[in-house]
Image (spheres, rainbow, N blue to C red):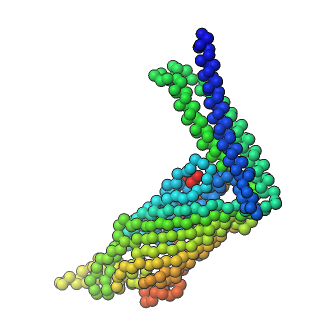
């Protein structure tokens, strides 16, 4: 009996010690993260107001407020871009895996699928040839270290330290309460409720899983509450970041075009694989007073062709009359292009500036691009981005109404394009799933 009592007391002590150590470790880890923020060197008003992972959450919502094209960044695991003017849909997935320590997002790989769907419907209705486009994009993005600026001798730092300390103490109380409730429930578990299993092993596994989940949950809560605190208080002057992406577009199927040298010449099939290599660099600024700025520089090279560059005439010969040698018949060849077809590489240099005022969900953007080589057109886009938020204030969907100005330098001559160089477009960006944490 004495041995049994000693064993029971030993098990109780071990259980209590495991609980105490586990909850204490979680709380100590949160306090250590908080201490790092508190003691981070304040160099002329530049330092840390929230932890690195909290800044990941903060930036994910700020950066995702503009998601118009492929060169724009989303810090969500999945996102979709729709371009009505080009009839393209891009579906992307971010393969970033979060690190266990408190660190900012340093790099990740995004894989996506790009498909042209608008042309398929219009071609079917108008009895035209399909301009099929289907391919995959792979890009690597490197993030810079976020920087936070505030008045070196002001109250922003003191207010944030005090608010974070309150968050830490509140979370510590909740952690202890959750653990106590769990241990009470676990102690009530009986052997007959887990037949065929060792009760001690079952409790050990359940305890291990519970504290692992508890740790992940409350570390996430600590980061999320810090981010909300910075958003709600606006206790900063400026947050900056930058990122660089290098990627490639790999077409799966070729583009097919029907081209003849003139209206009376034989129609020939031509093919093009629009392979694309691109690099972008973006600078980002967030100011509570001035608003949000995106400045992007982009360069790319892609396999272009005479049709898409607008250097050929478009001729619809559906329903034209002709002779088969004896009788007059209706020729139904669909649409085709007139002129000399060729494939060539087009280098492109582009820049884009986006501004969204701090108290507004509507902004303005301007993009300009210069093409080189066989196609030298200067194009630009003037846009009005609109971001819709959900009930938590997080960007849910992005629209951008666009005015597209093509061939501003009048490079193309004697084709249909100079008579229709202005168009209206619309892009839609939808970030969804969880953020890159």
Residue 227 percent location from the top left of the image:
68, 53
- Tell me what residue is drawn at x 38 percent, y 68 percent: 132
- Viewer-proximal residue, 79 or 160? 160
- Tell me what residue is drawn at x 62 percent, y 26 percent: 15
- Tell me what residue is drawn at x 28 percent, y 86 percent: 265
| Image position of 105 with respect to 175: above or below | below
| Image position of 224 with respect to 7: above or below | below
| Image position of 376 with respect to 208: above or below | below
Residue 356 percent location from the top left of the image:
66, 67
| Image position of 177 with respect to 280: above or below | above
- Tell me what residue is drawn at x 48 percent, y 70 percent: 278
- Viewer-proximal residue, 84 or 234? 234
- Viewer-proximal residue, 91 or 321? 91
What residue occupies the far left of the structure in this picture? 326
Q: Is residue 38 visible?
A: yes
Q: Is residue 128 visible?
A: no
Residue 169 percent location from the top left of the image:
74, 41
Locate residue 272: give its quadrant: bottom left
- Viewer-proximal residue, 50 or 8? 8
| Lateral position of residue 227 relative to residue 346, left or right | right
Quadrant including the N terminus: top right
What residue occupies the far bottom of the structure in this picture? 414
What residue occupies the far top of the structure in this picture? 1
Count numbered badges in the picture.
0
Residue 37 percent location from the top left of the image:
71, 52
């Amino acid at each position: 009996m004495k041995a049994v009592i000693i064993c029971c007391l030993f098990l109780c002590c071990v259980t209590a010690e495991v609980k105490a150590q586990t909850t204490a470790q979680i709380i100590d880890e949160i306090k250590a993260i908080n201490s790092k923020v508190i003691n981070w060197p304040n160099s002329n008003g530049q330092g840390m107001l929230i932890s690195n992972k909290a800044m990941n959450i903060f930036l994910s919502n700020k950066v995702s407020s503009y998601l118009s094209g492929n060169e724009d960044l989303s810090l969500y695991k999945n996102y979709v871009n729709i371009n009505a003017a080009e009839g393209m849909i891009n579906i992307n997935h971010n393969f970033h895996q979060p690190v266990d320590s408190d660190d900012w997002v340093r790099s990740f790989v995004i894989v996506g699928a790009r498909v042209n769907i608008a042309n398929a419907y219009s071609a079917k209705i108008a009895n035209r040839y399909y301009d099929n486009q289907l391919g995959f994009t792979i890009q690597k993005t490197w993030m810079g270290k976020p920087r936070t600026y505030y008045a070196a001798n002001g109250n922003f730092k003191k207010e944030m330290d005090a608010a974070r300390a309150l968050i830490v103490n509140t979370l510590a109380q909740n952690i202890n309460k959750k653990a106590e409730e769990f241990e009470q429930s676990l102690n009530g578990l009986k052997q007959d409720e887990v037949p065929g299993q060792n009760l001690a092993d079952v409790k050990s596994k359940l305890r291990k899983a519970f504290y692992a989940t508890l740790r992940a949950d409350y570390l996430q809560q600590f980061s999320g509450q810090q981010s909300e605190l910075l958003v709600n208080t606006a206790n900063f002057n400026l947050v900056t970041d930058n990122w660089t992406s290098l990627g490639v577009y790999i077409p799966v199927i070729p583009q097919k075009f029907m081209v003849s040298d003139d209206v009376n010449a034989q129609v020939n099939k031509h093919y093009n694989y629009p392979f694309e290599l691109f690099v972008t660099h973006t600078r980002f600024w967030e100011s509570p007073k001035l608003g949000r700025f995106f400045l992007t520089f982009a360069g790319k090279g892609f396999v272009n062709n005479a049709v898409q560059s607008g250097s050929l005439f478009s001729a619809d010969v559906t329903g034209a009359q002709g002779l088969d040698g004896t009788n007059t018949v209706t020729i139904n060849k669909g649409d085709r292009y007139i002129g000399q077809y060729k494939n060539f590489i087009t280098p492109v240099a582009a820049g884009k500036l986006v501004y969204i005022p701090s108290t507004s969900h509507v902004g303005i953007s301007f993009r300009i691009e210069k093409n080189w080589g066989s196609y030298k057109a200067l194009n630009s886009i003037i846009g009005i981005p609109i971001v819709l938020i959900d009930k938590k204030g997080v960007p849910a969907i992005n629209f951008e109404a666009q005015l597209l100005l093509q061939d501003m330098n009048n490079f193309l001559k004697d084709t249909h394009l100079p008579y229709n160089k202005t168009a209206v477009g619309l892009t839609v960006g939808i970030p969804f799933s969880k953020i890159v944490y």
